[in-house]
Amino acid sequence: MSSATSTVDKKFGQNDPKIVQYAEQVFVHSDPLLNEIAVRSEKEGLPVIQVSQMDGLHLEVIARSLGAKKMVEIGTLGGYSGICLLRGLQPGGKLYTFEGSAHHAKVATESFKKAGFSDRVEIFVGTAIQNLPKIEPYGPFDLVFIDADKVSYPAYLDWAAKNLRVGGTVLADNTFAFGLIADEHVSDPQDKADVEALREFNRKLADPKGVFRSTILPTGEGLSYGVKVRA
């Protein structure tokens, strides 16, 4: 085994395909339920943008480590990531999940039923920013997972900062902006709006004067991870 390299030489993330293959072979196991959800969601016309099975595993393990009983998901899609979160939920806990599309919510409802989680999840259909206040009386929450429209990420973070308990966690997917987060020039107007919002989100989450102590996990899409350390 070679000697350790300097920490300044160690790369952020893992770009060696052999290591990626190894990690997936060891940690990711056959999951017929999640596979069925992915296939059915695509057949129903949902975009193929759900988290990977490895990222879903991250969600479950983090939820378990928190002992989470009250969780919020912004961006339900077909229920794939919600089921990963629910697998890490403590007995008697509940997931509140928010989805803009009634059709997506219908697919997710079937997914939660197949997984046996119907009694532990509540889906809100419509604009998340307008619906989130409905659950505030049930807070504070243990975990908020954000995987929805990128331009609203800063607003979702503001909500999480106010409604998480101290010690609670906010997670946000796609915070590498699909590889564009560090690009100086983004020409497409929608991409530019998304990238600017994600940069603002990351800046606010990482602000040492804010309420979070945070990092970003170098998954393929980037998973920002903050723990609320002060009220």
Image: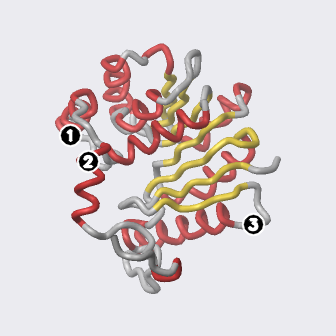
Secondary structure under badge 2? loop
Look at discs 1 and 3 and give the one toward the viewer.
3
Mark linked to residue 55: none
In percent of width and height, residue 33 lies at: 26, 27
Give the SS element for disc 3.
loop
Q: Element under label 1?
A: helix
The amino acid sitting under disc 3 is: Pro
Q: Label 1: how many residues lie within 10 Å, few (<14), some (14-19) or many (20+)?
A: some
Q: Residue at x 46, y 85 (%)?
A: 184
Q: Earlier in the sequence, mark 1 or mark 3?
A: 1
Image quarter for residue 68?
top right
Pointer 2 with pointer 1, Cβ within 8 A: yes
Q: Position of residue 27 (x, y in %)?
A: 32, 44
State how far apart marks 1 and 3 are (Cα).
41 Å
Q: CA distance from mark 2 to mark 1?
A: 6 Å
Provide the residue designation for mark 1: 42
Q: Which mark is residue 208?
A: 3
Q: Residue at x 17, y 36 (%)?
A: 43
Amino acid type, mark 2: Val
Sooner in the amino-acid sequence: mark 2 or mark 3: 2
Q: Badge 2: few (under 14), some or many (20 or more) residues near its Cα, within 10 Å? A: few
The answer to whether mark 1 and mark 3 are in CB contact below 8 A is: no
Question: Which amino acid type is shown beneath numbered disc 1?
Answer: Glu
**Which of the numbered marks, if any, corresponds to residue 48?**
2
Q: Nearer the viewer, mark 2 or mark 3?
A: 3
Q: Which residue lies at the image location 73% right of the left edge and 27% below the top edge?
A: 137
Tell me: 105 left or right of 231: left
In the current view of this chain or complex, which residue is farthest to the bottom?
184
Evaluate if marks 2 and 3 touch, with contact meaning CB atoms under 8 Å apart.
no
- Percent of width and height locating residue 122: 51, 23
Q: Which of the 4 quarters of the picture holds residue 5?
A: bottom left
